[in-house]
Image (cartoon, rainbow, N blue to C red):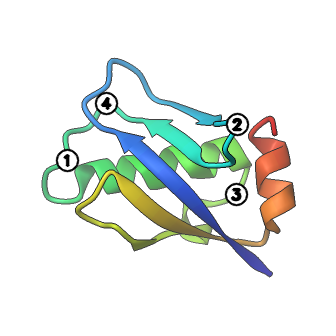
Amino acid sequence: MACILEVRVQPKSGRTAVSLEPSGRVKVWVTEPPERGKANDAVVEALARALGVPKSAVTVTRGHASRNKLVRVEGLTEQEAKARLGG
C-alpha cells in the first residue's frame, strides 16, 4: 500500500512546516536551500515526521529540481496521509 502526494515546496523558508491546502495539495516549507538535493532531503524528513512514518517510506518520485513534486509514501493510503495532515 502506498500513495502519491502532490507537493509544493518553499525552500529557504524561515521555518519547517507541512500543511494541506484546500485543493488537496501538500505545502512544505523547509529552511534548506535548493542546492545539491538539500531541500529534497528536508522535504522527505518533514513529511515523514508530519505523517508519522520512517524517512525510508518517503520518496520524491518526480520534480527533483522543481518546487512542484510528486512524493510517494509507503504504508499509507492517500486518505490516511491527508487525514494525518489535517484534511
In this rendering, position of residue 17 left or right of residue 1: left
Q: Earlier in the sequence, mark 1 or mark 2?
A: 2
The mark lying in front, picked from 2 and 4, is: 2
Instruction: Give the alpha-carbon distance from disc 1 to disc 3, as whole Å.
Output: 24 Å
Residue depicted at x 29% and y 48%: 39
**Mark 1 or 3 closer to N-term?**
1
Mark found first going from the N terminus, 2 or 4: 2
- The residue at the point 61 percent across, 62 percent down is 5
Label 1 to label 4, Cα distance in Å?
10 Å
Q: Amino acid at mark 1?
A: Pro
Residue 16, image x, y percentages: 45, 29
Quickly name the residue at label 3.
53
The furthest residue to the front: 23
Marks 2 and 4, how far apart at CA: 23 Å
- N-terminal of the pair, mark 3 or mark 2, is 2
The mark lying in front, picked from 3 and 2, is: 2
**Crowd rating for badge 3 (residues with CA inside 10 Å; few <14, some 14–19, many 20+):** some
* Residue annotated with mark 1: 34
Q: Is residue 49 above or below residue 61?
A: above
- Label 3: state its secondary structure: loop
Q: Position of residue 62 (x, y in %)?
A: 40, 73
Residue 22, numbered label? 2
Q: Where does residue 7 sit, x and y in percent of width and height?
A: 51, 53
- Residue that mark 4 sits on: 31
- The amino acid type, in three-letter code, at marker 2 is Pro
